[in-house]
Amino acid sequence: QVQLVESGGGLVQPGGSLRLSCTASGFTFSVYWMYWVRQAPGKGLEWVSATNTGGSSTDYTDSVKGRFTISRDNAKNTLYLEMNNMNAEDTALYYCARGGDYGYDYWGQGTQVTVSS
């Protein structure tokens, strides 16, 4: 069965960095677009970043451009999100998601990221 398992979240100070990972199994990872989405406390889901199947094309929501980097290692079936210069607005539950025909068709359980001094 399809599984997406996020890791790497935690508590970080403003201006700090974290690297999230998402390990995929149960499907051919290399043929799917992959996404990071997040949900801040009391708010709805927000798309953060996307990468195409080979990782050559990426996109970001405006609030993270220049600070976050999405990447993937298809040999390891793993998606990454490098987050730098973080601020309180980045506090959220971060999910990786697999692209489907109409949005995301599978999600992980999420990893909590908290930015606080």
Image (cartoon, rainbow, N blue to C red):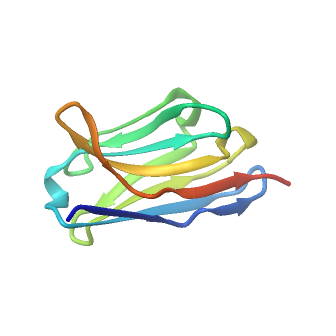
Residue 63, given in percent of the width and then of the height, sits at 58, 31
Residue at 65% from the left image edge and 43% from the top image edge: 90
Q: Position of residue 8 (x, y in %)?
A: 55, 66
x%, y% of residue 100?
20, 40
Give the residue at the far bottom of this rendering.
Answer: 76
Seen at 73% across and 59% down, the residue is: 12
Horizontally, residue 83 falls left or right of residue 96, namely right
How many marks are shown on the rendered structure? Answer: 0
Splitting the image into 4 quarters, where does residue 23 fall?
bottom left
Instruction: Compare residues 115 and 45 and report the one nearer the observer.
Output: 45
Above or below: residue 7 compared with residue 115:
below
Residue 11: x and y, percent? 72, 61
50 vs 81, left or right, is: left
In this view, 57 is above or below 71: above
- In the image, farthest residue toward the right: 117
Residue at 50% x, 34% y is 45
Between 9 and 76, the one lying in front of the other is 9
Relative horizontal placement of residue 5, taking residue 87 as reference (left or right): left
- Of the 4 image quadrants, the one containing the N terminus is bottom left
The quadrant holding residue 117 is bottom right
At x 56%, y 40%, the residue is 39
Query: Is 97 on the left or on the right of 42, as rendered?
Result: left
The residue closer to the viewer here, 91 or 62, is: 91
